[in-house]
Amino acid sequence: MKTILLTISILLHSLVPSISVNKQDGPGEVIYRVHSIYIYNFIKEIQWPDTYNNNNIVIGVLGSPEMEAELKKMAAARTTSSRKITIKQFKSVVEVDKTCHILYLATEYSDGLSTVLQRVKGSSMLVITNKDGAAKFGSLINFVSEGGKPRFEMNLSAFEKSHLKYTQQLKTVAITVN
């Protein structure tokens, strides 16, 4: 099973630039779709503490109505371990709370990362950003582009502090940051 997941992850990395359902989609729509696929796979490759496993997976989105829409499409089509995925929109940094398993910060809100991290301190929330260098400042996962292909950075020390456990396969395909 682990070999299959690793193979899928590697294939995803090689196929991601060509993913598009509609030829009329612009590059923004494609990257939101790619990021939603990554986030779905993160759900499967990350284990939350037992206290987080009793209900639905909640993905919070700060900013980016486009990403919210793409995540809602993904959530409508998929579940994970018989748990429903729900999407929660935040309109400002001060609205962010500890009710999410995952929080996606749009690029325009990534400057507020330190405030967000203070607001969710002590929780086991997977904070995902989309800005160069954000992983070095405490984001657990940060989407980047490497050689024109979407990749992600993984902050191992932030993962340790969050009490989230990740698979070796996830670490293998990530760009690791300490």
Image (cartoon, rainbow, N blue to C red):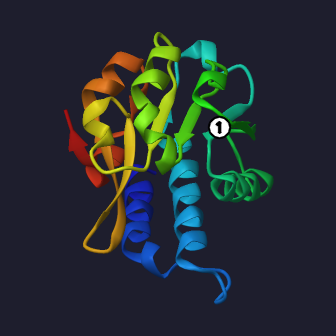
Task: Answer with left or right where residue 3 lies relative to residue 63.
Answer: left
Quarter of the figure that contains the C terminus: top left
Q: Nearer the viewer, residue 133 or 99?
A: 133
Task: Answer with left or right where residue 169 lies relative to residue 44.
Answer: left
Residue 12, compared with residue 124, is above or below; it is below
Residue 166, compared with residue 8, is above or below; it is above
| Residue at 64% in and 81% down | 25
Residue 106, compared with residue 113, is above or below; it is below
Q: Nearer the viewer, residue 78 or 108?
A: 108
Q: Position of residue 83 (x, y in %)?
A: 74, 36
Furthest-right residue in this view: 76
The quadrant in which residue 149 appears is: bottom left
Name the residue carrying label 1: 59
Q: Residues within 10 Å of mark 1 (few under 14, many from 20)?
A: many
Q: Position of residue 3 (x, y in %)?
A: 37, 56
Furthest-left residue in this view: 178
| Residue at 43% in and 50% down | 130
| Residue at 44% in and 43% down | 129
Amino acid on which the number 1 mark rests in the picture: Ile
Is residue 55 shown to the viewer in this render?
yes
The quadrant in which residue 134 appears is: top left
Residue 76, compared with residue 111, is above or below; it is below
